[in-house]
């Protein structure tokens, strides 16, 4: 298969949960997961662009690879976390848990327009890449991309652990799963 190789990496384990902080950094375990993932990626492929969503836990997850490759991490807001309703931030952040638990059981096509738009932007950004990249991102973001490849409308099409790598290819502006590697 030809095309552009894109490796998607879920961030490491956060110090605080989705329902405890809007932008938590990594836990001690998360830092170790990121270091292990960086070493494995650096052994497997040559240096390429490194991108991350703007969230602290994601930028921190990308940092060990950036250090190994001696290059910066570019912020790619298009691969950010699924947008939470504004009323569930700040003092009401604990209410995000039931909201996201509900989202995890839903299908695209019947969600809030902001979420539908977010998914379209994620897919358009990654399918528009013109050179190889490693992108550090989020659980539902990576699921949205894999679901788009498979034609699966579920918000969760597979379970991925912290710092798990999902390999994709962009061929003529279309996304595909990569079973070849590099």
Image: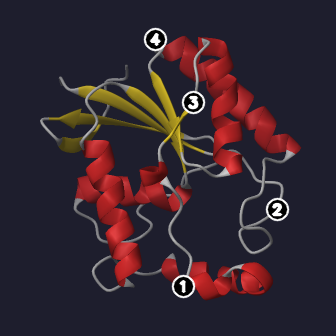
Count neighbours of disc 1 (C-alpha within 10 A) and say few if under 14, some if 14 to 19, many if 20 or more: few
Please determine whether, in this image, residue 72 is positioned above or below residue 125: above
Mark 3 or mark 1, which has the lower sequence index?
3
Mark identifier at residue 16 = 2
Mark identifier at residue 73 = 3
The residue under the point 39% across, 85% down is 112
Observer-nearest residue: 22 or 39? 22
Mark identifier at residue 102 = 1
Q: CA distance from mark 2 to mark 4?
A: 33 Å
Mark identifier at residue 42 = none
In this image, 91 relative to 76: left or right? right
Q: Are marks 1 and 4 in contact (CB under 8 Å)?
A: no
Please determine whether, in this image, residue 173 is positioned above or below residue 19: above
Q: CA distance from mark 4 to mark 3?
A: 16 Å
Q: Which residue is mark 4?
A: 46
Q: Are marks 2 and 3 in contact (CB under 8 Å)?
A: no
Q: CA distance from mark 3 to mark 1?
A: 33 Å
Observer-nearest residue: 127 or 41? 127
Q: Position of residue 104 (x, y in %)?
A: 51, 75
Which quadrant holds the N terminus?
A: top left
The residue under the point 36% across, 72% down is 154
Residue 147 in sight: no
Observer-nearest residue: 15 or 76? 76
Mark 1 or mark 2, which has the lower sequence index?
2
Q: Secondary structure at mark 2?
A: loop
Mark 2 or mark 4, which has the lower sequence index?
2
In this image, 70 relative to 36: left or right? left
């Amino acid at each position: 298969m030809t095309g552009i190789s894109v490796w998607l990496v879920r961030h490491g384990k956060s110090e605080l949960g989705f329902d405890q902080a809007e932008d938590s950094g990594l836990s001690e375990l998360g830092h170790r997961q990121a270091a292990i993932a960086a070493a494995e990626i650096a052994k497997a492929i040559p240096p390429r662009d490194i991108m991350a969503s703007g969230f602290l836990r994601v930028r921190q997850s990308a940092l060990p690879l950036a250090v190994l490759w001696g290059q910066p991490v570019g912020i790619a807001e298009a691969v950010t976390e699924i947008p939470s309703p504004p009323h569930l931030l700040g003092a009401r952040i604990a209410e995000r848990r039931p909201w996201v638990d509900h989202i995890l059981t839903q299908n695209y096509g019947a969600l809030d327009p902001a979420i539908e738009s977010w998914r379209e932007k994620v897919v358009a950004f990654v399918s528009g890449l013109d050179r190889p990249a490693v992108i550090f991102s989020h659980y539902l973001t990576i699921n949205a991309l894999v679901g788009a490849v498979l034609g699966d409308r579920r918000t969760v099409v597979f379970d991925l652990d912290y710092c798990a790598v999902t390999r994709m290819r962009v061929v003529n502006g279309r996304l595909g799963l990569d079973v070849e590697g590099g």
